[in-house]
Image (cartoon, helix red, strand yellow):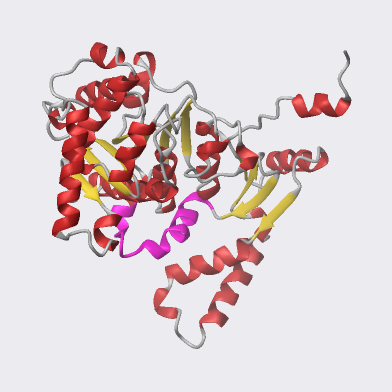
Amino acid sequence: MPTSPLENKLAANNDIVSIPSIFDLSTESDRKKVGHLFDTGSIRRVVDDFEEQVRELFAIRNPSDVYRPDFFEKVNRHIEERKTAMPLWQQGKWVFFPWLSTLTHILDDEDFQRVRTARNRNLIREEEQAAFYNAVIGIGGLSVGSSVALSVVLQGGAKHIRLADFDRLALSNINRIRSGVQDLGSRKVEMTARQIYELNPYAIVEIFPNGLARENLDRFVGGPPKLDVIVDELDDVSIKYLIREKAKQYRVPVVMGADNGDNSVLDIERYDLDPSLQFFHGRLGDVSYDELKSLDKFDIGRTITKHIGPENITARMQESLLAMGKTIVSWPQLGGAAWINGAAVAYCIRKIVTGQPLEDDRAIISVDEKLLPDYHSDAAREKRENTAESFRKMFGL
């Protein structure tokens, strides 16, 4: 039975390239390329805020002039001098985002990064910013991992990022992943890559759309270039094990943030400093890849509980884990906790790549502890201890 033209269009593969194109319109060849994009209707929107970017750059380079009465006269004169040397539309770069059908005018790479990170100083010192930007980061798992990636790039970190996830965005994901219904069905690696490029068009994003496995972990970790930090936000505990094998081999630190209700459990494993470190800081005991690979759903839950620690799992999260397969289909995750993890892991990455002091084992980031008025009362403490003990016995821990 023939389908309608509209149905055929709706069923068509609408995947769009997830890498921006960067053009230099001072060259004839790039002017022709951009002209072709206009002629074919690929460009539907033009964003040209370049003059304001030049003004900001001038102020950043001349901070002592900003509050002087003649500052605006100076910056206007600077703009006119640049226009005389070359028309503004031929300066800098033009970036075409095919998924947005948008052409945007921005400064050249070095100047762009200088303006983009200007408000970071001196919370992040100049030499720290350079080290953070030049770091190579790998992120496996793009639920919480997408929050990590965006938190890192938002702060001017990691020009070079590798993203690994085999999954596509589902409606139930958008309670915690920064995206919308326009991206439903998109590969998470591509969706996250697009958001990174929108923050930094000069980024280098490598995607691993089939996830991580033995066959590609050397490429993911060892590169070239080799990763400076591995972020583990994977669900598969056996792949978590393999990641740590490679982290030990290549001497790369691993950072993992696990959401726990409204809170976060942050684990830091410094294989760069001590390659003999026991995997998972020994919390899972003496386990092997084959053992973890053979776990059923109950044993996976038991293993995760053992790693996080029953004493650290919130009461509602414990209730939820016991309700899986009965009244809920999976463990719950909240958007707020995903972003707490994202910010915390990004903080750890920045401290590691800039050589600053950092906790080398575990940190509990608890919103409950700081904001619930009776959290430290004797009754609340006793209730948590009793609940943790019951949970421990239930899993035989």
- Of the 4 image quadrants, the one containing the N terminus is top right
Relative to the observer, which residue lies in front, 201 or 68?
Answer: 201
Residue 355 visible in the displayed image:
no
Assign the magenta stretch its main secondary structure.
Answer: helix
**Going 17% across and 56% down the picture, which residue do you hit?**
379
Q: Residue 252 is drawn in which quadrant?
A: top left
Q: x, y (%) of residue 6?
A: 85, 29
Q: How many marks?
A: 0
State whether residue 242 is above or below residue 199: above
Q: x, y (%) of residue 239?
A: 32, 21
**Going 59% across and 76% down the picture, which residue do you hit?**
77
State whether residue 118 is above or below residue 143: below
Q: x, y (%) of residue 121?
A: 34, 64
Which segment is the magenta one? 108-129
Left or right placement of residue 82 versus residue 375 in this view: right
**Going 32% across and 26% down the picture, which residue do you hit?**
221
